[in-house]
Image (cartoon, coloured by chain):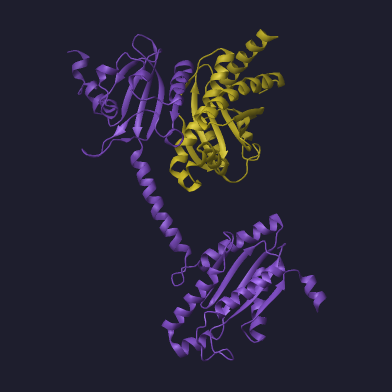
Chain colours: A purple, B yellow
Amino acid sequence: MSEISLKPFDMNDIFNTLNLGVCAVDADGKVLLWNDWIAKHSGIKETDALNKPLDQVFSEPVSPSFLTAIKNTLTYRLPVVLSTALHRSPLPLHNISGADQQPTRMYQSITITPIQSQQNESCCLIQVTDSSTSIKREKMLRAHSEILKKEATTDGLTDICNRRFFDAHYEMAVADAKRQKYPLSIFMIDIDYFKSYNDHYGHVAGDDVIKRVADALKSQLSRATDIVARYGGEEFVLVMPNLPQEVAEQFAEKLKSAVFNLAMPHIKSQPFKQVTISVGVCTGIPENNDNLLNKADTALYQAKVKGRNQCICLPLCEAEEYLEQ
Amino acid sequence: MNNLSELHLDALAEVFSIGAGRAALSLSEIVGDEVRISVPFVQVINSKDINSTTLSLNSGRFGAVSQHFSGPFNAEAVLLFTEEQALKIVSDMMGSQMSLEELAEFEHEAMCELGNIILNACLSAMADILNFTLESSLPDYTVASADEILQRLKANSNQPYVMVLHIDLAIEKRHTAGNLVFLLSSASLDNLITHVDQFLGKIS
């Protein structure tokens, strides 16, 4: 019994059943092998491909880097990989998803390995896998992750940034300002007599006030570098880089007016009888252990003590403060 | 190690520079922008002494592309880049097509390709110039700390010597330094020295 007949399968059947493109070219780049997978996705029959130079088999051009890779493998006898990331679609291969649909160009991963023919000729074997599915999956996962990322950093009630986002952003903003030596302004904002508002008007109305104040604050921002976040219950925080102290002071007044101009009645708030905010600002170029946030909080406290519906601005630098005292 | 003189190391640096030039050409073709790769120096270290400190690698995570080469010269060649550098190189190579986040899926394969281009170019230049032929496995890519990668390399072989190539890679104005680490058996090192000697004999 010959050895061949002992083999359980015809290797040609295996070769043509593979869910992977396989072809081989000789030293002159002429096609020696062409499996069914390649025939199906290129629309070119094996009989039309064999013995033709690979770059002339297709009606559309083959990418130059693919041809360079073949040349390198034939010259240096070393294996080459062509990734989807850097080449996308080197060969004109297509996927047909439905009878009435246009074929779409297939994303490919390609491996080229040196191989010797039985005549001892230096050839190379080309394996092509379809990476369209993994790209599609990647895009879907990315879209989901974008949504989740946004949800994770957004405050549910007000739709502005949440505390989690602020904490991360604040740290980066301080580090950037420190490194590039520009001033950073932190605005701490609190709705005046909010507890009394809730007690008198109820929590639903209270939530509405928080939403409208958040909108008013957000509407004042125009630079991509600035953010407003909900810090806690009725507290908000703004981070704004690169503002001179006097501009920061003017901006705090603008925030205060924006909320005042909403003219939301608040019977328990004396003397204005409407919803107001207090603003504490700290501006400065952060150095080693400076804490802009604490300083802005101190300023907010001073604004509250001073009678509310007030803005207090403190410089970051301790020395200036001592001089003032 | 004792047999490998400054002259040998200089000759090897020269040979690898030619390979680096070829790799740069291939990469430029893919990126569509000028890529420069140079090999400032080559070191041969006893593998007992190799760790992240002797290679001046920091503690971050590294991407390592490795290929096994065989012929008169047997070596496992490993190209090391910090994970951050790897991502930057790949994103530079891909232009603005993708963000850093999008790269995750493709990083693995793209780094394999980048490593494959550099490793093949260096090794084929060496084979060409020193006149021998090499075979190679397909590239593998792993991400780990430098010490983990080096430990794995040492555990997988009892090769006594490590040849380290320091590589500078620049795409446009961005500079990235990487290390190409070869693990060599002592027989391989002897063979390599013989080939370098023949080469030096021819040119002197």
- Vertical relation: A146 (above or below) A46: below
Q: A138 or A203, which lies in front?
A: A203
Residue B158 location (% of width, % of height):
54, 29
Above or below B102: residue A310? below
Instruction: Tell me the quarter of the picture where residue A55 sits.
Output: top left
Q: Which residue is drawn at 32% across and 25% down?
A: A22
Tell me the quadrant of the picture where the C terminus of chain B can be found: top right
A319 in relation to B48, above or below: below
Query: Count the marks: how many?
Result: 0
B25 on left or right of A108: right
Determine if residue B3 is in view. no
Q: Is residue A6 visible?
A: yes
Looking at the image, which residue is at 43% across and 70% down? Answer: A156
Q: Which of B96 and A219 is in front in this view?
A: A219
Residue A50 x, y percent position in the rendering: 29, 15
Indicate left or right for A265 with A106 as reference: right
In depth, the one of B17 and A197 nearer the eye is A197
Quarter placement of the N terminus of chain B:
top right
Q: Is residue A14 above or below residue B144?
A: above
Query: As drawn, which residue projects farthest toward the left?
Result: A1
Percent coordinates x, y for residue A294 in the rendering: 66, 72
What residue is drawn where x is 48% and y is 80%?
A209
Residue A173 spot, x, y in % from top left: 62, 60
